[in-house]
Image (spheres, rainbow, N blue to C red):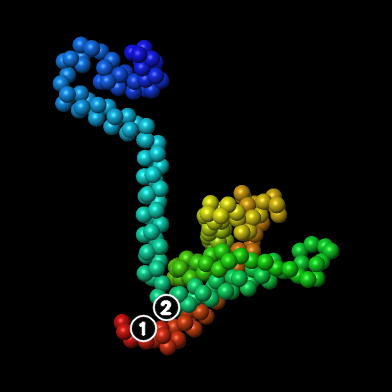
Amino acid sequence: MLSARSNTVAADPFAPEIAGILGGGTMRSRRLNGRSVGHAMRSTLLNYCHRSNSFVSSHMSACAGLSVAVVFVCHSTLEQMRQPMKLRFIVYGLLGWCLEIVWTGLPKRRPIDWRLPAHTSCWMFPIYGLLAPLYEPVHNHLRTARRPWWQRGLLYAVGIMSIEVTTGWLIQHITGAIPWDYRNKTNWQWRGLTRFDYAPLWFGVGLGLEPVHDWLVRYTSTLPATQAQRRKR
């Protein structure tokens, strides 16, 4: 029985400690009273659990830190999203939907399918709506800093492609698929999440959204609900 038990425990890295406590040595077990044995058993088991779960604990800590950061950013964003920004969020989402339908319906190969089929995704509405809390502050900062148009366009392109990668990665991990999967469409892509040959397109889209942003700010500031909210302040 002793030999079978020692062979079973030897496969574990903590076998010597556990075997010594559970009765691996007769003289030692006689010297230790019940309290010291219990204390040694608890210390050894805690050490065993701590070492065996170190990998999981480190990853859980990283995930917890990332979750706290995401919650903090979302809370700060929601605090800033007053009534006008909520309305602009909806407008950007609807505008993005319409533009994507037009873009995907344009003929891009021959023979031309004159039905002009187009498509979009329900996921795209909140993604386009993110222009309100993300694009508008960047535009305001670049305008205050008086950056030239080409610098603004480059920053817009990089920002839009970064959002494309981030949101596509999240949706892929949630659903297992990317709404705009580029893997079978071009070689100028990265993991199906973004297309590098679309950088000039996003360059122009970013610059084209500047007057749209300014017009939406002027329009939403004249709404009765917005004026009533300002009076309450």
Q: Is residue 53 visible?
A: yes
Q: Disc 2 on helix, strand or loop?
A: helix
Tag shown at residue 193: none
Q: Residues within 10 Å of mark 1 (few under 14, many from 20)?
A: few
Q: Residues within 10 Å of mark 2 (few under 14, many from 20)?
A: some
Q: Can you tell which quarter of the image residue 77 is in?
A: bottom left
Give the residue drawn at x 28%, y 32%.
46
In this rendering, position of residue 63 left or right of residue 164: left
Q: Dots 1 and 2: beta carbons under 8 Å?
A: yes
In this rendering, position of residue 25 left or right of residue 67: left
Query: Vertically, is 200 above or below 5?
Result: below
Image coordinates for residue 66, horizontal then vertical, percent: 40, 51
Specify the amino acid type for callout 1.
Answer: Gln
Q: Quadrant of the N terminus?
A: top left
Specify the amino acid type for callout 2.
Answer: Gln
Q: Can you tell which quarter of the image residue 128 is in?
A: bottom right
Image coordinates for residue 38, horizontal then vertical, percent: 20, 27
The mark nearer the N terminus, 1 or 2, is 2
Query: Vertically, is 166 above or below 142?
Result: above
Tag shown at residue 83: 2
* Residue positioned most to the right: 111
Residue toward you, 178 or 48:
48
Q: Is residue 169 visible?
A: no
In this rendering, position of residue 227 left or right of residue 29: right
Image coordinates for residue 107, horizontal then vertical, percent: 76, 67
Q: Can you tell which quarter of the image residue 109 is in?
A: bottom right
Residue toward you, 201 or 40:
40
Q: Quadrant of the C terminus?
A: bottom left
Query: Vertically, is 47 above or below 91?
Result: above
In the rendered image, which residue does mark 1 sit on? 229
Give the residue drawn at x 49%, y 83%.
219
Residue toward you, 29 or 157:
29
